[in-house]
Amino acid sequence: MSEVAQALRKARRVVALTGAGLSAESGIPTFRAPGGLWRIFSPQELATPEAFARNSRLVW
């Protein structure tokens, strides 16, 4: 990991490719997949500034 950090510090440009496909392959639950996070949590209730103020850890 320190080699990666060192390479990033030396880099002139860095590109990060992210998305649900990357998450799913890593075992991180996606939002829309069967059993995904939007099946467990309601986006209408959580995707608001008020929800973040109430429980930032859950929303984040």
Image: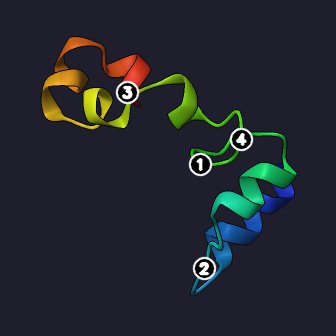
Q: Which marked residue is nearer to the observer: mark 4 or mark 3?
A: 4
- Nearer the observer, 34 or 16: 34
CA–CA distance in space, label 4 to label 2: 33 Å
Q: Earlier in the sequence, mark 3 or mark 2?
A: 2
Q: Is residue 46 left or right of residue 27?
A: left
Q: Earlier in the sequence, mark 4 or mark 2?
A: 2
Q: Give the number of callouts.
A: 4
CA–CA distance in space, label 3 to label 2: 28 Å
Q: Earlier in the sequence, mark 4 or mark 3?
A: 4
Q: Which marked residue is nearer to the observer: mark 4 or mark 2?
A: 4
Which of the numbered marks, if any, corresponds to residue 14?
2
Q: Which marked residue is nearer to the observer: mark 1 or mark 3?
A: 1
Give the position of the C terminus as an image quadrant: top left
Name the residue: 62% across, 72% down: 16
Compared to 32, does 44 lie above or below? above
Rendered image quadrant of residue 50:
top left
CA–CA distance in space, label 2 to label 1: 28 Å
Q: Local crowd at mark 3 within 10 Å, few (<14), some, or many (≥20)?
A: some
Amino acid type, callout 2: Val
In the picture of the structure, the residue carrying the numbered disc 1 is 32
Q: Earlier in the sequence, mark 2 or mark 1?
A: 2
In the picture of the structure, the residue carrying the numbered disc 4 is 34
Helix, strand or loop at disc 1? loop
In the picture of the structure, the residue carrying the numbered disc 3 is 59
Amino acid type, callout 1: Arg
Q: Earlier in the sequence, mark 1 or mark 3?
A: 1
Which of the numbered marks, if any, corresponds to residue 6?
none
Q: Is residue 1 left or right of residue 31?
A: right
Compared to 13, does 26 lie above or below? above
Furthest-bottom residue in this view: 12
